[in-house]
Amino acid sequence: MHGSKPEITVITLASLTTMGSHLGVVYLVRDVSDLEKLLEEVSPRFTGKVPVKIHMGEPGNKYFLRPNEIEPVLKFIRENRGRPFLFDTVVLYRSPRSSVSGYMEVAKRHGFSEICDVVIDEEGVPVEVEGLRIEVCKTIATNSQMVVISHCKGHAMSGYGGAIKNLGMGGVTKETKRLLHEGAMPRRVEELCNYCGICAQVCPENAINVQEGQWVWDREKCFGCGKCVENCPEGALDYSLRNFLEALAISAKACLLGMRKVLYLNYLLRISKLCDCSSSPRNEIICGDIGILASEDIVSIEKASLDLIYEKGGEGLFERVHRVDPLRQIEYAEKIGLGSMDYELIEI
């Protein structure tokens, strides 16, 4: 399923004769009420402490996953002798979620503390992956199993945010978050620049000003989305360190290095224009509900999620909205060995 246009083959359980390994297999249910069936089919068996990675919502955001939508997952883990706890990391930007105490209060206000123990992490363990020094949060670094619950939606920098972004940005320290953002800031090759101004047009923060013979970049406004680099027709702009989408995949790989067992659950519900970190009133639903996916392959579930969203919301939906092709993060994740973009989709 590598083509630009998604070709989705849905296999029902009734017609399935043999499965083989779970690798590259993605399961789909259409409603939260069928979550138990989904989990029974994937049959994850977690014992002992089970970290459950989830974004617990920015104050003012309307679309993040709600406690009742993930409670069946916690119930399933408990019934199979696991002890789940929800976790996330503090954020880099100005927000109540930028401190452990502030985020704990948000988790309580949003109802997550009522259904499960919550850990907010700010400590990290450094590892080097693909030439980048990544500080993986302590919760991930000290465990060998994990459930990753991701709300799939748009994102200004990555085009789309799912499991790769949930780990790559949400599973690391503030220092690594800063590295990923600043590493994607532009570096200009003056002799190649013809001052066409396209970079200024695509910049969402108005951080670039181009006039005749002058190119001015405001570092304070720039948050490293990379749109100027990706859209420069002359190749006059490059990344200070690394393309943001590739860096996300590398960071996600760092989070998975010591893992023995990981289950990914992608919720394709309330698919919004902006990420769950946004409290902007301009945020809106851009694609109808599809269902919930489960897989043990992060690349397969991300490709299936993107294909299903494009099938329902229109080909290239996120690229049209954000001028960023999110497929690049998935392709690079496959390239560095995180899984396969070829998958079977099995609807339960």
Image (cartoon, helix red, strand yellow):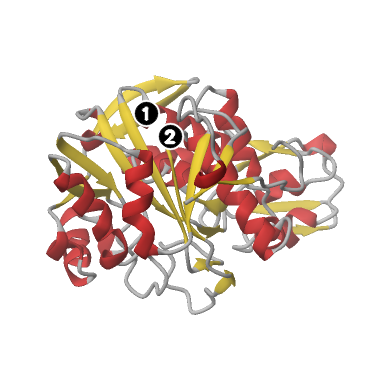
Q: Is residue 147 above or below residue 293?
A: above
Image mark for residue 272: none
Q: Quadrant of the N terminus?
A: top right
User: x, y (%) of residue 260?
Assistant: 30, 24
User: x, y (%) of residue 138?
Assistant: 22, 34
Q: Is residue 238 above or below residue 267?
A: above
Describe residue 317's horizontal placement relative to residue 148 as left or right.
right
At 67% from the left and 57% from the top, the residue drawn is: 310
At 49% from the left and 79% from the top, the residue drawn is: 281
The residue wearing badge 2 is 252
The residue wearing badge 1 is 256
**Under tag 1, what secondary structure?**
helix
Q: Say whether marks 2 and 1 touch (CB < 8 Å).
A: yes
Under mark 1, the amino acid is: Leu
At 48% from the left and 61% from the top, the residue drawn is: 30
Q: Residues within 10 Å of mark 1 (few under 14, many from 20)?
A: many
Instruction: Tell me where residue 233 sits by quadrant.
Output: top right
Q: Residues within 10 Å of mark 2 (few under 14, many from 20)?
A: many
